[in-house]
């Protein structure tokens, strides 16, 4: 049975998509079967996995409207070694269409149940806003991985996300919990980042992952080549950190 995780943060630009595709590639490298679900209409996780979002015949949009199954709509990222349920601009329209439908926040959960035995991990890349799409992700997931930069405004956004997760846990998905906080784009030379990192550890304790993802140019360059950084430059510090993170995730899941 697949473990399903949302990669979510209500603050934009914190590296959610970078975290999703590189964790997926890292997990694939350590022998896990992985599906990435792109729930963002921008389709960045789709493109960052080497799949042309404009050429997709079926996407997560069709799955949410129940006109296709995940088995029909998924595509293979050959170079990165995992499957992708892609997204494109069509998905923006799903917001409006879903409002009228029954079981609107549980449609992704039902679709994932049909392929749960095909994967060890399902990673859902959520949009930054709390929308019907994000809600579908949170209702499907066993837990949330929160990528965050160690800066002041990130702490503000985190408290909003924690409240959202509590509400979803209470009303829609009693399985939902924060699996861990991942410190990304970390620069140890900046005193403020070290201070915020220490604050996170003192407040959240074991919920903070041991792995820290450094600020890394190669990770930033990789999407323009349609590859996760882990595949684009396996020797870079960023790529090696994500493979370490993948191993830490596997360990954490076995103790869940």
Image: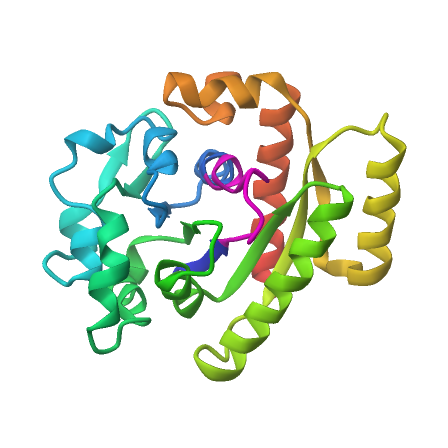
Residue sitting at 39 percent across and 59 percent down?
2
Left or right of residue 166, residue 194 in this image: right
Instruction: For the N terminus, give its image quadrant.
Output: bottom left
Residue sitting at 65 percent across and 54 percent down?
157
Model colouring: rainbow
Q: Quadrant of residue 160?
A: bottom right
State the residue in front, 60 or 102: 102
In reply to whether residue 170 is colored magenta, the answer given is no
In reply to whether residue 11 is colored magenta, the answer given is yes
State the residue in front, 250 or 86: 86
Residue ranking furthest to the bottom = 171
Q: Quadrant of residue 82?
A: top left
Q: Is residue 96 above or below residue 39?
A: below
Instruction: For the C terminus, give its image quadrant.
Output: bottom right
Q: Is residue 161 visible?
A: yes
Residue sitting at 52 percent across and 53 percent down?
8
State the residue in front, 223 or 180: 223
* Percent of width and height locating residue 11: 58, 48
Left or right of residue 50, residue 236 in this image: right
* Percent of width and height locating residue 179: 61, 60
Q: Is residue 253 above or below residue 106?
A: above
Q: Which residues are magenta?
A: 7-20
């Amino acid at each position: 049975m697949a473990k399903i995780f949302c990669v979510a943060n209500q603050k934009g630009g914190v590296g959610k998509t970078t975290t999703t595709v590189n964790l997926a590639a890292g997990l694939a490298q350590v022998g896990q079967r992985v599906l990435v679900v792109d729930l963002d209409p921008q389709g960045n996780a789709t493109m960052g996995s080497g799949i042309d979002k404009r050429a997709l015949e079926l996407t997560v949009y069709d799955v949410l409207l129940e006109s296709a199954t995940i088995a029909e709509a998924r595509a293979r990222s050959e170079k990165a070694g995992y499957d992708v349920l892609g997204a494109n601009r069509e998905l923006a329209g799903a917001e409006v269409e879903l409002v009228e439908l029954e079981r609107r926040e549980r449609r992704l959960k039902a679709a994932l149940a049909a392929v749960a035995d095909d994967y060890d991990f399902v990673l859902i890349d959520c949009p930054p806003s709390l929308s019907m799409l994000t809600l579908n992700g949170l209702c499907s997931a066993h837990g949330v991985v929160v990528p965050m930069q160690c800066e002041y405004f990130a702490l503000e956004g985190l408290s909003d996300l924690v409240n959202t997760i509590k509400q979803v846990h209470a009303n829609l998905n009693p399985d939902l919990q924060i699996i861990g906080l991942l410190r990304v784009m970390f620069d140890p030379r900046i005193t403020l980042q070290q201070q915020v990192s220490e604050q996170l550890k003192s407040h959240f304790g074991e919920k903070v992952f041991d792995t820290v993802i450094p600020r890394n140019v190669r990770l930033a360059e990789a999407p323009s080549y349609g590859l996760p950084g882990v595949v684009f430059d396996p020797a870079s510090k960023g790529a090696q950190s994500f493979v370490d993170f993948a191993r830490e995730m596997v360990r954490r899941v076995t103790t869940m």
